[in-house]
Image: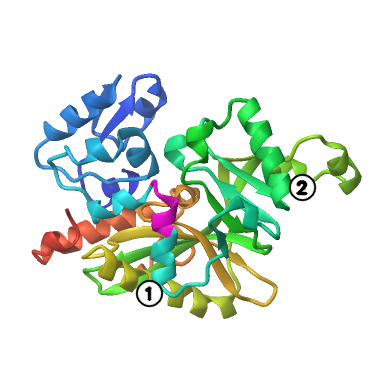
Amino acid sequence: MHGAKLEGFKTCLIYEKRRRFYRDFHFIDEYYPYDSVEEVVDILNGLGDCVVIPHGSFVEYLGIGNIGRIKVPIFGNRKLMNWESDQKLKMGLLEASGIKIPKSFSRPEAVDRPVIVKVPEAKRKVERGFFIAVSYEDYKRKVGELMKEGLIDEEGLKGMVIEELVIGAHFNVNYFNSPVFERVEVISVDRRIQSDLDGFIRLPASVQLQLSRQPRLIEVGHEVATIRESLLEKVFEIGYSFVEASKELEPPGIIGPFTLQLMATPELELVVFDVAPRIGGGTNVYMGIGSQYSKLYFGKPVSLGRRIAIELKEADGQDQLNKILS
């Protein structure tokens, strides 16, 4: 909304009533507090001439069924939202892109190396259902512990994704596919801050070994990062490959922002282990100052919010809104 305001748009916010701090922000023109998801759908459908900008919480809170009931236009390809909560679909899209991804295991019994296990979002008892296992026996033990603690249940085991644990440097690369400018842009790079992993890795190895449980990977923030210049060509290559594959599998493909979460290995390979087909959670670290790569396209600091607003303004001026709204 801050970026939209800079580009001359009127803004409105639909927010949970308990989050009153939003009312202190000058760049929000209209406020709509809500108590239930049903209210959100009704509010949106009553707004009339507006565009909804989706993000992770939008999909998670409303759910795909309710999003289908929204009658006002959404920025981007709303059909790709069906992929948001299905890890297997997302990994299939990456595989179709020809992008290097971790080896997956269809059966826990086949685990023969360290793996990261991902519980489907719809089945989680906690925000992030990840855990690491070094063998099948370790997998069984940790599943038992999580079930005993009530963090997952039998339903949570269905659809679980088991992937090879790739060791490398973690980056979130935030892209923007622009139908108006006909290019894929690299907007920014960030990294996750996770609790209590962030504190765990600062402990001496001797202390880590004495702890009876593994660290949890709960995302609590993000930090700014850059990626070495010689890797940028590969970053662009996988971005374009992902966009082309999305056009084939879910026409017209990805529109606007998306994030590829990847590991850069010591051999300088990029291994993508997840994708967010919408605004990435870490892009807010650049909100007030603009991101390091987007400035190179426009000659001024451009946050992701402002980049979306620029696309909307250009499309409106060229009578091309049908290319970016659904």
Asked whether, in this view, residue 50 is left or right of residue 21, the answer is left
Q: Amino acid at mark 2?
A: Ile
Q: In the rendering, at what x and y percent does residue 161 appear?
A: 52, 51
What kind of secondary structure does the magenta stretch mostly adopt?
helix
Determine which quarter of the picture holds residue 44. top left
Q: Is residue 88 magenta?
A: yes
Q: Is residue 251 magenta?
A: no
Q: In the rendering, at what x and y percent does residue 182 appear?
A: 25, 74
Determine which quarter of the picture holds residue 48. top left
Q: Is residue 232 visible?
A: yes
Q: Secondary structure at mark 1?
A: helix
Q: In the rendering, at what x and y percent does residue 20 appear?
A: 38, 22
Circle 1 packing at 10 Å, graded few (<14), some (14-19), many (20+), is some
Disc 2/disc 1 C-alpha distance (Å): 34 Å
> Circle 2 is placed at which residue position?
201
> Circle 1 is placed at which residue position?
240
Res. 101 mark? none
